[in-house]
Image (cartoon, grey):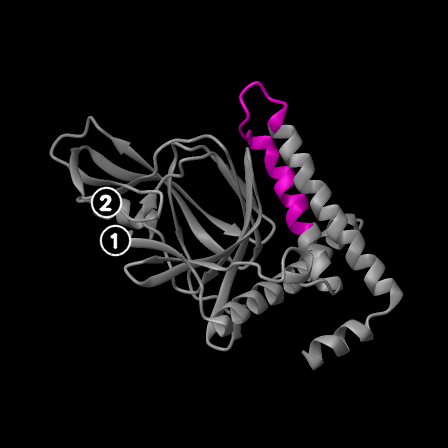
Amino acid sequence: MCSRMLELFSRTPTDLFMAEMFRDAMLHRISDLKQAVDVRLTPRFVPDDVRHGEAIGAALAFMVDAGIGLTEAFDKDLAVEVVKNDDLVVLYRISLLTSTGLAVRLHLFPDSSETYIHNHRSNCMSVCLFGGYEHTIWAVDSSASGSTFGEQLRNGDGTLTEEVMRPGEVAPVSTYSHEAGHCYYLSQQSLHTASIGVSEHAIDLDGIKCGTLTIFCKDSTHGTTRVVVPHYLDEQHRSASQFVPPVVKSSSESAVSDPSERKRVLSAMEACLRSAARSIRDRRTTRASPS
């Protein structure tokens, strides 16, 4: 508490003004995105909406770098959630906005984590602020003979249904690096994975190695989340995907109840955002410099 009070009193009027300006800009950008979605005949994301996500992420990074923390900007009791696959942490997340038609979250991925092959029930987009991961798009070829794959559905609480065998072959379509400054749009039908390696730039705060931080936005379309498990991957596919996606028996989503863990996660997110702010300034300076 004392250190927090000293931090507040040490801010200059200029610091406070800039931090408040960035917070207002972030909230305005979120409002812009919501309005863009709401006025459409079918309220859903389109690929061009990633520009709003980029603006939200930049304003959030500048706000934290200027001195306003996440709990100060949103809620002192801001909930931190953890998503686990088979008791392994895949990501931590906080909600910046949850409303009719739109959700905006901050996702923190620990190093050496990876997701199973899945889609999202809503159209979504991701903006990488810090670190990065290998992003792979997958497809199911139902006409392939002699191959099968397992399919599970994800329940509302994050748990998975029993696996059902389907005919067809699951194969990677494209793979690329989702790095700081990059963004992508993903339709609700698209199957994908994220594989987070060990980053030399990871921030280690009290045992949490923070390799990647992203802004994740989703619209209000409601589909079904599928989890697919390929039961056959030939060497060509292994080479293209560069990793064999994990087979997951269980998945869960829950609030982080330990106050110290919650504090460490929020501190890690803020450290990543401060680093992101510096990187964004550097990229803008580079683009503005004459060649």
The residue sitting at 56% across, 68% down in the picture is 268
**Highlighted range, magenta:** 38-58
Q: Residues within 10 Å of mark 2 (few under 14, many from 20)?
A: many
Indicate which disc residue 229 carries. 2
Percent from the top left, x then y, of residue 8?
77, 72
**Percent x, y for residue 161?**
23, 43
Whether 265 is drawn above or below 251: the answer is: below
- Image-based side of 55 in relation to 129, left or right: right
First-in-chain label (2 vs 1): 2
* Residue at image coords 18%, 30%: 144
Residue at the far top: name it: 41
State if disc 1 and disc 2 touch (CB < 8 Å): yes
User: Magenta stretch: dominant SS?
Assistant: helix
Q: Is residue 234 magenta?
A: no
The three-letter amino acid code for the residue at tag 1 is Val
- Residue 97 is left or right of residue 168, and the answer is right
Nearer mark to the viewer, of 2 and 1: 1
Q: Percent position (x, y) of residue 196?
A: 42, 58
Gap in angstroms between the C-alphas marked 2 and 1:
9 Å
Q: Quadrant of residue 137?
A: top left
Q: x%, y% of residue 227?
A: 29, 42
Residue identifier under label 1: 248
